[in-house]
Image (cartoon, rainbow, N blue to C red):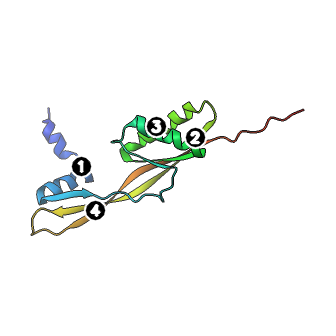
Amino acid sequence: MQNPEAKEDKKEKKPKDIFRELIDREEYLLKKRLPAKLPRRKNDVYVSRKTNFQAQLERCQRLLDSGNEVFVHGLGTAINRAINLALQLKERGLGTVEVATHTSTVELVDDLEPETDELEQETQTRHNSAVHIRVYRKEVQEMEQP
């Protein structure tokens, strides 16, 4: 019977794990830059995991009611929340609201700041998934009169 630690040594390490070891070993401080945003419009909502979900939902509902469309953007772990938000708006619309979803990959940049003077500052790029959801009201078609 093999030792579980021996099995772990045999497994290949993921780049993420190797990077974490590099940061710890060389005493770098990881600072994540903010992602590049799309041009900010009145009806754009950037969803985060930190903001209250109910507040985000109410804001989107107000924007949808005033302009008939809202764009919900989610990045990384906020994707599930963005999708949930769009589906809640669709459900509230009682058949009058539709959604159109687009996915993308966003390049993010992290700064590695050394904690000692002997090391140099470095940057790292990584990719993260993103979702962009257009929530809009369907056009009401005039009923044909006989």
Q: Amino acid at mark 2?
A: Asp
Q: Which residue is mark 3?
A: 57
Mark 1 and mark 3: Cα distance apart in space = 43 Å
Q: Residue at x 14, y 32 (%)?
A: 1
Badge number at residue 124 = 4
- Which quarter of the rendered picture does the C terminus lie within? top right
Callout 2 touching callout 3 (CB < 8 Å) = no
Mark 4 residue type: Gln
**Discs 2/3, front:** 2
Residue 101 makes an appearance in the image: no
Q: Nearer the viewer, residue 72 or 109?
A: 72
Distance between the alpha carbons at the discs numbered 1 and 2: 52 Å
Q: Could you tell whether 48 is left or right of 92 in the image? A: left
Snapshot quadrant of residue 116: bottom left
Answer with mark 1 or mark 3, whichever residue precedes in sequence.
1
- Mark found first going from the N terminus, 3 or 4: 3
Q: Looking at the picture, how far across and down is residue 81, in whole percent? A: 42, 39
Find residue 6 and report its horizontal and vertical position in percent. Answer: 14, 41
Q: Secondary structure at mark 4?
A: strand
Disc with the residue nearer the chain's start (1 vs 4): 1
How far separated are the C-alphas under marks 1 and 4?
Answer: 21 Å
How far apart are the alpha carbons under marks 3 and 4? 34 Å
- Give the residue drawn at x 22%, y 66%: 122
Residue at figure coordinates x 43%, y 40% from the top left: 56
- Residue that label 2 marks: 65
Say which element carries label 3.
helix
